Image (tube, grey):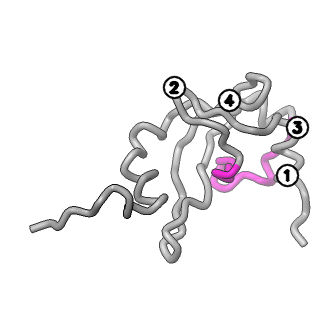
Amino acid sequence: MCDSVPLNQISEAAYWLLNSKDILDKEVIGAGGWKLGKVKEIVVDTTSWQVTSLELDLEGDIKRDFNVKSHLVDGRFPLDPQQIQSIGDRIVLKSTKEELFRLVASPTT
């Protein structure tokens, strides 16, 4: 027998995972309307149960224009969920593509 859990006690990660079929393969659009790619995987930290990134399959033009191959993990671009403005028919980002790739290319200190 499975006990039910009140909706307000479902963690952020559980919400994402429960709705993953609605998120996977969803188109990601940046500020200004440019198409970045599609969500291929949701990455969760199993210790904190926080979503750490959405793994995107980038459009060919984006890969070429921004030379981001060195930042790709298994050919996918890690998108921080904090960059998301809204989720509807498409995932819309807060950042322009230039701002997003500047963040990714910045060395960590």
Going from N to C along the chain, the mark reached first, 2 or 4, is: 4
Q: CA distance from mark 2 to mark 4?
A: 10 Å
Which residue corresponds to mark 4?
29
**SS label for mark 3:** helix
Q: Is residue 36 visible?
A: yes
Q: Identity of the amino acid at label 4?
A: Ile
Going from N to C along the chain, the mark reached first, 3 or 1, is: 3
Q: Nearer the viewer, mark 3 or mark 2?
A: 2
Q: Are marks 2 and 4 in contact (CB under 8 Å)?
A: no
| Residue occupying the far left of the picture | 1
Q: Is residue 11 left or right of residue 6?
A: right
**SS label for mark 1:** helix
Q: Identity of the amino acid at label 3?
A: Glu
Q: Classify mark 2: residues with Cα within 10 Å, few (<14), some (14-19) or many (20+).
A: few
Which residue corresponds to mark 2?
89
Q: Which mark is residue 98?
A: 3
Q: CA distance from mark 4 to mark 1?
A: 17 Å
Residue at image location 27% in from the left, 63% down from the top:
5
Q: Nearer the viewer, mark 1 or mark 2?
A: 2
Q: Position of residue 16 (x, y in %)?
A: 46, 51
Q: Are marks 3 and 4 in contact (CB under 8 Å)?
A: no
Which residue corresponds to mark 1?
103
Q: Identity of the amino acid at label 2?
A: Asp
Q: Classify mark 4: residues with Cα within 10 Å, few (<14), some (14-19) or many (20+).
A: many
Residue at image location 48% in from the left, 39% down from the top:
23
Going from N to C along the chain, the mark reached first, 4 or 1, is: 4
The span shown in magenta is 66-82
- Is the residue 74 above or below the residue 49 in the image? above
Q: Classify mark 3: residues with Cα within 10 Å, few (<14), some (14-19) or many (20+).
A: few
Q: Identity of the amino acid at label 1?
A: Leu
Is residue 23 highlighted in magenta? no
